[in-house]
């Protein structure tokens, strides 16, 4: 029996009535049309067309094949449209890992994405612990890093500034050394990161300190007078319970990257999530593509 590659020649000739017009429609040489029709007629042992002064006309057998071809064409077009429609829907799960400093921004943005895509499921983890994307602990991650993993798809989006802050009622004397104060610091696991290296220089190694692995904990501790510490001006400058006691500490900054597992490249739900995360910083004009 004929397949679609055969019957499309029948359909083209039936619609156009001439070999030349059919060949133009199909984008092939006119001899190809004649040869494919003749080959199909021989295989079916039936005459499909009659040549008349007004052009090629379908025989009864040809009409059967042409009708089948139209049904096949309709089915193919319908399938293509359904596939295109399916590609516009965000369906499935995406595991996202973010630092807690951006939790409020990210959750607000992703909530909007979820409202528009009821079949999308998001699993959000907020932590500074590094998710292993290679082991699929996350599909998409916001990560502070100087050098992101080479086997991940990544894009640097910004470099959040940092400065030293104290609680609004904290008794800070600018004439004293910063090493005279208690510091709110990151655990020793983060000792080699730029923020902690900067604190090491300012605070000295013998100062009293309180350690926490959460940005929100740092903020609360500093607000309530536990000590001084590095916070981001993006958040701290608008906090009425905090006061800045230093200019920006450039050596304490880290680049923020959006990282995606390579398997999610080209997958619509993954792109939608990464686009949403990127837009968070573009909307605030915090992107730094350099």
Image (tube, helix red, strand yellow):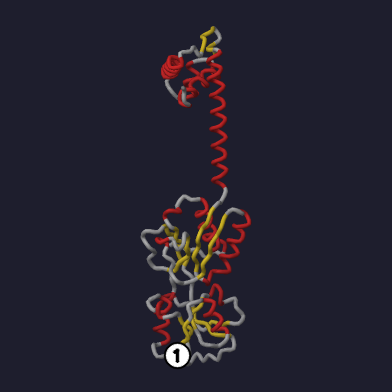
* Residue located at (48% from left, 80% from top): 212
Q: Nearer the viewer, residue 68 or 50?
A: 68
Q: Nearer the viewer, residue 275 or 137?
A: 137
Q: Is residue 30 visible?
A: no
Q: Which of 129 and 26 is in front in this view?
A: 129
Q: Where is residue 80 in the image (x, y as percent from the top left)?
A: 54, 37
> In the picture, residue 283 is in which quadrant?
bottom right
* Residue located at (54% from left, 28% from top): 72
The answer to whether 71 is drawn above or below residue 107 in the figure is above
Numbered label tally = 1
Q: Find the residue positioned furthest to the top.
A: 53
The answer to whether 155 is drawn above or below residue 128 in the figure is above
> In the picture, residue 243 is in which quadrant?
bottom right
Q: Position of residue 187 (x, y in %)?
A: 43, 80
To which residue does mark 1 refer? 208
Q: Nearer the viewer, residue 58 or 28?
A: 58
Q: At numbered mark 1, what does the secondary structure look like: helix, strand or loop?
A: loop
Q: Find the residue positioned furthest to the left.
A: 150
Q: Position of residue 129 (x, y in %)?
A: 45, 71
- Rate crowding at label 1 as few (under 14), some (14 to 19) or many (20 or more) other CA atoms within 10 Å: some
The answer to whether 223 is drawn above or below residue 152 in the figure is below
Q: Is residue 150 visible?
A: yes
Q: Position of residue 218 (x, y in %)?
A: 52, 80
Q: In which quarter of the image is the C terminus?
A: bottom left
* Residue located at (60% from left, 78% from top): 239
């Amino acid at each position: 029996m004929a397949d679609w590659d055969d019957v499309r020649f029948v359909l083209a000739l039936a619609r156009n009535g001439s070999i030349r017009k059919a060949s133009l429609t199909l984008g092939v040489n006119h001899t190809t049309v004649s040869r494919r029709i003749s080959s199909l007629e021989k295989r079916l042992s039936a005459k499909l067309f009659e040549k008349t002064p007004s052009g090629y006309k379908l025989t009864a057998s040809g009409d059967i094949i042409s009708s089948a071809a139209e049904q096949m064409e309709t089915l193919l077009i319908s399938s293509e449209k359904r596939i295109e429609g399916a590609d516009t829907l965000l369906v499935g799960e995406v595991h996202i890992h973010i630092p807690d400093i951006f939790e409020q921004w990210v959750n607000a943005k992703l909530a909007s994405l979820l409202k528009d895509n009821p079949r999308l499921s998001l699993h959000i983890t907020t932590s500074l612990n590094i998710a292993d994307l290679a082991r699929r602990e996350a599909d998409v991650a916001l990560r502070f890093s100087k050098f992101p993993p080479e086997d991940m798809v990544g894009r640097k989006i910004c470099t959040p500034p940092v400065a030293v802050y104290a609680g609004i009622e904290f008794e800070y004397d600018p004439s004293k050394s910063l090493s005279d104060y208690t510091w709110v610091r990151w655990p020793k696991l983060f000792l080699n990161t730029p923020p902690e290296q900067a604190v090491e220089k300012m605070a000295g190694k013998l100062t009293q300190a309180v350690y926490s692995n959460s940005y929100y904990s740092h903020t609360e501790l500093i607000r309530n007078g536990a000590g001084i510490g590095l916070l981001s001006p993006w958040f701290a400058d608008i906090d009425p319970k905090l006061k800045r006691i230093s200019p920006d500490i450039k050596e304490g900054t880290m680049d923020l990257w959006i990282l995606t597992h390579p398997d999610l490249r080209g997958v619509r739900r993954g792109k939608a999530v990464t686009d949403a995360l990127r837009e968070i910083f573009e909307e605030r004009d915090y992107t730094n593509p350099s």
